[in-house]
Image (tube, rainbow, N blue to C red):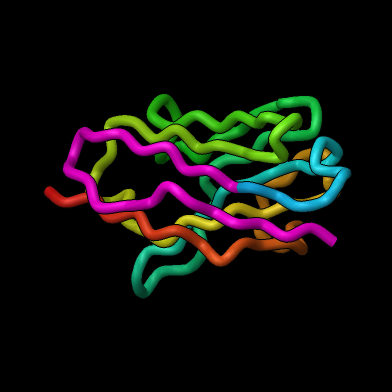
């Protein structure tokens, strides 16, 4: 069992940057693949990025080159650095954890945080 708490969301303007954090409980954080997903109003969950237990990263095409995911196993925390933000990045951002070695599918993640809101104004 792992509990996840996101933070770092907020209201920013187009072109600004934000860094989201996700703090995890438990002693086995380093063994989890950690993912970020987002959900915009009236839309389904959308995969954003994941970082595996050996720090392999993978991004959705919509954020590639603008977002970066990293992890600090000593702090049980995963980060999502978001640069060049666009209004279409507005969403509730969730982090999630899985024992799968690589995972871009929402269904592979059993553990989820409550989300942090990111709003990008034009």
Whole-percent x, y for residue 67 in the image: 44, 32
Q: Which residue is drawn at 87% across and 44% down?
A: 28
* Relative to 32, residue 113 above or below: below
Q: Which of 73 and 80 is in front in this view?
A: 73
Whole-percent x, y for residue 33 in the image: 76, 42
Q: Which of 103 and 79 is in front in this view?
A: 79
Q: Nearer the viewer, residue 51 or 28?
A: 28
Q: Quadrant of the N terminus?
A: bottom right
Q: Does the magenta stretch include residue 12?
A: yes
Looking at the image, the residue that sits furthest to the left is 122
Q: In which quarter of the image is residue 43?
A: bottom left
Q: Residue at x 76, y 52 (%)?
A: 25
Whole-percent x, y for residue 46 in the image: 50, 56
Q: Which residue is drawn at 64% across and 47% down?
A: 23
Residue 19 lies left or right of residue 113; in this view the side is left
Q: Nearer the viewer, residue 49 or 29?
A: 29
Looking at the image, the residue that sits furthest to the bottom is 42
**Count of marks, rendered view:** 0
Q: Is residue 42 magenta?
A: no
Residue 64 lies left or right of residue 85; in this view the side is right
Residue 18 lies left or right of residue 121; in this view the side is right
What are the residue bounds of the magenta stretch? 1-22
* Relative to 18, residue 104 above or below: below
Whole-percent x, y for residue 77 in the image: 65, 39
Q: Residue at x 16, y 51 (%)?
A: 121
């Amino acid at each position: 069992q792992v509990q996840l708490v996101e933070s770092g969301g907020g209201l920013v303007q187009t072109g600004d940057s934000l860094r989201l954090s996700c703090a995890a409980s438990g002693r086995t954080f380093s063994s989890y693949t950690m993912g970020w997903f987002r959900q915009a109003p009236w839309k389904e969950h959308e995969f954003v990025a994941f970082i595996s237990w050996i720090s392999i990263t993978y991004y959705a095409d919509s954020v590639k080159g603008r977002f970066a995911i990293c992890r600090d196993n000593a702090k049980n925390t995963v980060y999502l650095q978001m640069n060049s933000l666009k209004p279409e990045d507005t969403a509730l951002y969730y982090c999630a954890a899985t024992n799968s070695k690589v995972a871009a599918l929402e269904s592979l993640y059993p553990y989820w945080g409550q989300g942090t809101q990111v709003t990008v104004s034009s």
